[in-house]
Image (spheres, helix red, strand yellow):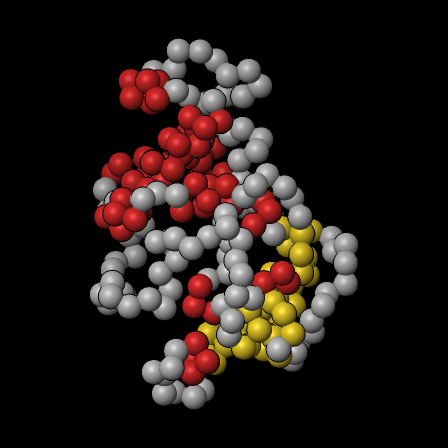
Amino acid sequence: MDGIHDLGGKQGFGPIDVGEDDNPFHADWEARMLGIVRAMSRPAPWSIDWFRHVRELIGPVDYLTRPYYDQWLQTYAAMMVNSGVATVDELASGTSVADIPGLGPPSPPSAVAGAIRNTARFDRPATEPPRFAAGDPVRASLNANPGHTRLPQYVRGRRGMVTAMHGAHVLPDASAAGVEKAETLYSVAFAATELWPEATAGGDRVILDLWERYLEPA
């Protein structure tokens, strides 16, 4: 999906601030937002890829001007309304007017810290042999999924080399649409001079983890 979120390699947005402190929150409400998200009950179709797709639908001005956790708030509100978990009026009032059949109660506060540490696994048994091996030259596809994808714009059509194989993992493009499909995941190295014509350091590389459907023989 070609949207404002895919800023890698683009110019005109100013320098990246690498001097921020290590504090993950810059206001109390941000920590509360994370806690609410970790504690809330979730409908079965929700996934990290669905969350990312909905977040990528935020308008460009909103996306660039909203704080990070404010984007989370907007995204989860949209997901809740879309899934029938809450209405716009319920979100505005902060009060639920009806139980949701099949949706369990939220986690207690004491369980939130553990939920943060228990991350989901996305590796799956392989069902097909990999098309590529370490050392193979490849080219990133020019075509990306019109919905969510993890293939960044700045590598599309560029040549790289497979440096590692990681087995089969859930494909984000399909997962965002509610379909679990696993494909081989590769680490692919791209020379900086291949990605950006103005690059002068011949030894610099960018290494990305890319799914098999994003690649073709070079």
Q: Residue at x 69, y 74 (%)?
A: 133
Image quadrant where one finds the C terminus? bottom right
Give the quarter of the image for residue 43: top right
Q: Position of residue 210 (x, y in %)?
A: 57, 63
Relative horizontal placement of residue 146, taking residue 37 as reference (left or right): right
The total number of labels drawn is 0
Q: Position of residue 140 (x, y in %)?
A: 55, 69
Q: Residue at x 44, y 63 (%)?
A: 153
The outermost residue toward the top is 97
Q: Is residue 103 visible in the rendered structure shown here?
A: yes
Q: Residue at x 38, y 15 (%)?
A: 96
Q: In the figure, 206 relative to 25: above or below?
A: below
Q: Is residue 208 visible in the rendered structure shown here?
A: no
Q: Residue at x 34, y 53 (%)?
A: 4
Relative horizontal placement of residue 122, taking residue 56 as reference (left or right): right
Q: State the residue in front, 16 or 30.
A: 16
Q: Position of residue 26 (x, y in %)?
A: 24, 47
Q: In the figure, 131 relative to 3: above or below?
A: below
Q: State the residue in front, 143 or 201.
A: 143
Relative horizontal placement of residue 111, taking residue 170 as reference (left or right): left
Q: In the figure, 211 relative to 101: above or below?
A: below
